[in-house]
Image: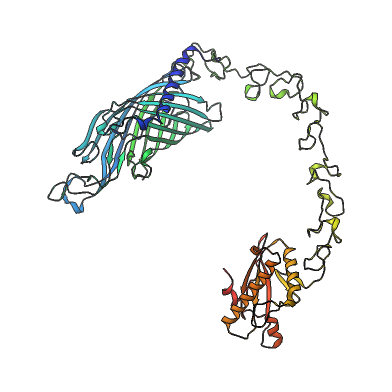
Amino acid sequence: MARGMTSRTCLPVAWFSAALALSLCLAPGASAQSRLSGGGMDLRLLRPPLDSKGLLTLNGTDILGENALSFGLVLDAGFGILPFEGFENDGTVSASDAVRRGRLVDAMFTGTLHANWGIANLLVVGAQLPVSVLTGPDVTVPGQYGEGGGGGLAYQGFGGVVLHGKIRLLRPDRDAFGLAASVQVELPTGSPTELVGDATLALVPSLIAEWRPARELRLGAEVGYRLAIADGATLRTGGRTEPGNPAGAAQGPVLVDGEGRDLRYEDTLRFGLGLGWRFTDVTELAVELIGSQVIDAWGHPHALSLEALGGLKVFVERNSYLLLGGGAGLPTGGFQAADIRGLVGFVFEPSMGDRDGDGMRDDVDRCPDEPEDYDGFADEDGCPELDNDRDGILDDDDACPMVPEDRDGDADEDGCPEGDEGDRDGDGILDVDDRCPDDPEDIDGFEDEEGCPDLDNDRDGLLDTDDLCPDDPEDLDGFEDQNGCPDVDNDGDRILDVDDRCPDRAEIYNGTEDEDGCPDTGIVDWEGGTMRMFEQILFAYDSAEILPESENLLDAITASIQGNPQMRLLEVQGHADDRGSDEYNIALTRDRAAAVVQALVLRGVDPQRLRSAGYGERCPAQAGTSQAARDANRRVEIKVLRTEDGPTGVEVACPAGRELIPR
């Protein structure tokens, strides 16, 4: 048996574990149960916390001390619950003028008594007893509990009794956050036909989380699953309305069967978020968002209920307080949300002579003013053991709080004994295997096994801290030798320096001796995103057929494009002189540009890098109608539209030709 877990703690822990396991195991089998017709429906969205450690409705992760008790009474009043469409009960208004939207419940008052018992500083068990008063308008709701059934909702009596347990998993005052689990058993002791209880048993396992970023702040979250052993009631909350009497007066609102949307009260997800601010020693401000969702009714206009709440706690003793709060429903149309809600309550937790609040009575607590730290070491005396192994290192800073440090000069600050397997330089290599036990290995992926720092891995004379390529030696060729990286292609023309006759001058790819690495003058060049051609691509008269005389020029263009892979998209443009109609010239130049693209693709250029366009006579290179101007204007141009760095911003066409740019 683990230290600190006595026989008196085993039984309640086993009971809680069995109840939680039972609720989880029943979840997948619930649909196979024999479903009762009719059933019940519980309109309570606001449910007080199980014990004295929560906010307004959300549970906290703290628990009562051993044998500590808490009691509470919370009164809440909700006004305007359960939306419906029908006539308001008014015999003076005609059916056509009657208000068709309202609430089936005008007001619901609930007082909830709860009592709890703390066990072994680990577990809380208890019970809740709600008492409700319910009022509503006269209404007939087909399908709720069979057909017919008029008359207003009126009930005074008990709701469903709840038995519950909560176990703490993580402590928010010691761990990064608090975590607890609870299970509730909801008994069918209320009146299911009056919307204040279930017709059968329901189980609600929940998970509770809490984070305390500061001493006075706590943020909480809770999610639970209400597992119904049998189906609840089916309620029709919308549909075509009809008069309540033959005269047509809007009297006795009616929801006509067969045209509404049914809402069946079944398995439900419960959830909430909250914030508590203890802005003085005796006051805490709390705000919450709580809700519920009927699992099998996602998208139903009334299945999601949400309320926002705010309240103030005034502490009259250490853990006893008065509560005053209120809230309103959010406009989701949820069947459990109230338009307006108020609450008031008193929760009492007798101190039982426990000044430090550690759950141990002062008469048996050796340190009644210092709370026990409950870390599994000597937790029975009520005193915090800040240094369990007595090695002079506080447990919060001690990696081995139960084993004393050996104080051998090797990592003595961590609280763990190193013995013969020490590591003086702290590089993760034991001294027995470390060639440099007092100089830590630099752990850079280069000869890290011997334990010695390698300050210049590639031995190029540049320390690794200054070397951009610590594992590749600099080639020391006078070109950018200070960065530590070998520059195998100084001029970046993709011809390695060992094969480059001009390693510091980039090759110009133009089809003229492109293999030697030296820039040469050819028949094509680039200027400002446009290819300069020192010859013209020639076509047959009135045709897109390229003449054989232009084969060498096409080869040079191909070499230049292939030699500049950073150019991702180029446009081959066809232009014409002033002779011929605009439509004819546009068609001819489009065909000629497409023919050039086809010729380049046949020579190996990726077609994804090319597109063609024809601009006719719209963008002349030279004004006028002379032969020289016409020769200059009949041309093919190639422009770079996009590189690996993005769009070039080159002017694609003149203003007159922009409407012809391909889209």
Q: Report the residue that reaches farthest toward the left.
A: 247
Residue at x 58%, y 84% (from the top left corner): 581
Is residue 315 visible in the rendered image? The answer is no
Residue 490 is drawn in which quadrant? bottom right
Q: Name above or below for residue 590 compared with residue 455.
A: below
Q: Quadrant of the N terminus?
A: top right
Residue 163 x/y as whole percent: 36, 23
The one of 662 and 241 positioned closer to us in this rendering: 662
Position of 326 with respect to 587 (left or right) is left
Position of 122 with respect to 621 (left or right) is left
The one of 347 and 640 positioned closer to us in this rendering: 640
Q: Name above or below for residue 302 compared with residue 416.
A: below
Is residue 96 visible in the rendered image? The answer is yes
Position of 257 with respect to 458 (left or right) is left
Residue at x 65%, y 16% (from the top left corner): 389
Residue at x 73%, y 22% (from the top left corner): 412
Q: Name above or below for residue 66 compared with residue 31.
A: above
Q: Report the residue that reaches farthest toward the bottom.
A: 626
Q: How is the image coloured?
A: rainbow
Position of 582 with respect to 135 (left or right) is right
Q: Quadrant of the C terminus?
A: bottom right
Residue 335 x/y as whole percent: 32, 40
Q: How many marks?
A: 0
Residue 338 x/y as whole percent: 32, 39
Residue 527 x/y as whole percent: 73, 70
